[in-house]
Image (cartoon, helix red, strand yellow):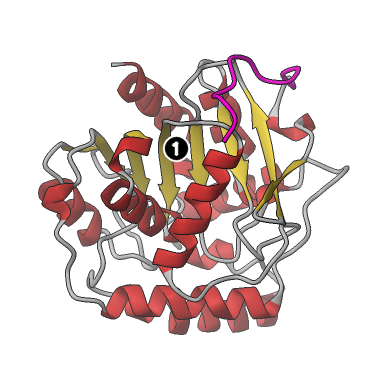
Amino acid sequence: MSAPRSSPAPTPSSYQSAPTRSVSVHGVDFVYRELGPGDDVPLVLFNHLAAVLDNWDPRVIDGLATRRRVITFDNRGVGASGGSTPDTIEAMARDAVLFIRALGFERADLLGLSMGGFIAQVIAAEEPHLVRKILLAGTGPAGGPGIDKVTALTVRAALKGALTRKDPKQYLFFTDSEGGRRAGRAFLERLGERTHHRDTAISLSSFRAQLKAIHRWGLQEPADLSRIHHPALVANGESDRMVPSENTLDLAARLPRGELVPLYPDAGHGGIFQYHDEFAAQALEFLER
């Protein structure tokens, strides 16, 4: 394994212009983007169901990258990364660890959103020396209430989106209030700001594998979170339908060093996108403490 890098490649000015790079992980290419200052401890982001590089809110990434080295990536089989997507969260976590080490890092902060939060929990438990701090958004513990219903919710939202000609994320990530609908439209507009060198959409086989992994996570016996001793910041909207917000409260209470961000009002699964400025500031304060 190469030594940890002391400085990044030339830093892009924003996520919109960040180049897509790749690194070989046991013969499989993983694609990633990187921006921000050259910290020795990067902030590595783990994405939600069906998401690729272009599904991160550029306002969240740019806000974090003002003071932190931020790395987003497509895990095995997702987007433009090679290989086949595993159908368990534990296997996804192992691949993510290999990716971080392939970049030459021996320590990292982790930010996991939704399914990415499941992965971050497994890494923190299984590879504690690799992790410094963790941020968990819109996510929950293994066996958490409602997590096994994600497949049904996603299918219904996809059908509703097809009938109304709207992106299903409008229904899955945001509330149906006037403010929630407005926040959803603004978020979707931001996702379209990058017009060149966009990522590859997730394949149907990878999407199915992720759904299977999430369903298994939701049916598992509750994990022993007391062995995760890293400082952990936990955030969500107050009305998350995909991973019900009670899971957020449970995570913060069960993690020995868990810290709860007050649930964002009139916000759902995409709470950190709806409140992107607030979340970036809260995350930076936590990471720099």
Give the position of the N terminus as an image quadrant. top right
Q: Position of residue 214 (x, y in %)?
A: 41, 73
Residue ID at (27%, 44%): 263
Q: Evaluate whether residue 266 shows in this view.
A: no
Residue in the foreground of this view, choosing between 115 and 63: 115
Q: Is residue 113 above or below residue 284?
A: below
Q: Position of residue 200 (x, y in %)?
A: 78, 59
Q: Height in image: 158 above or below 247?
A: below
* Camera sees residue 3: yes
Highlighted magenta segment, given as a residue range: 1-12
Which residue sits at x=39%, y=65%? 90
Residue 125 higher or lower than 262, as above or below = below
- The residue carrying mark 1 is 275
Q: Is residue 153 above or below residue 141?
A: below
Q: Is residue 8 magenta?
A: yes
Callout 1: SS: loop
For residue 226: magenta?
no
- Judging depth in this view, the residue of 172 and 6 nearest the camera is 6
Q: Residues within 10 Å of mark 1 (few under 14, many from 20)?
A: some
Residue 274 locus on image (x, y percent): 48, 43
Which quadrant would the C terminus be assigned to in this image?
top left
Decide if residue 12 is on the left or right side of residue 72.
right
Residue 122 falls in which quadrant of the image?
bottom left
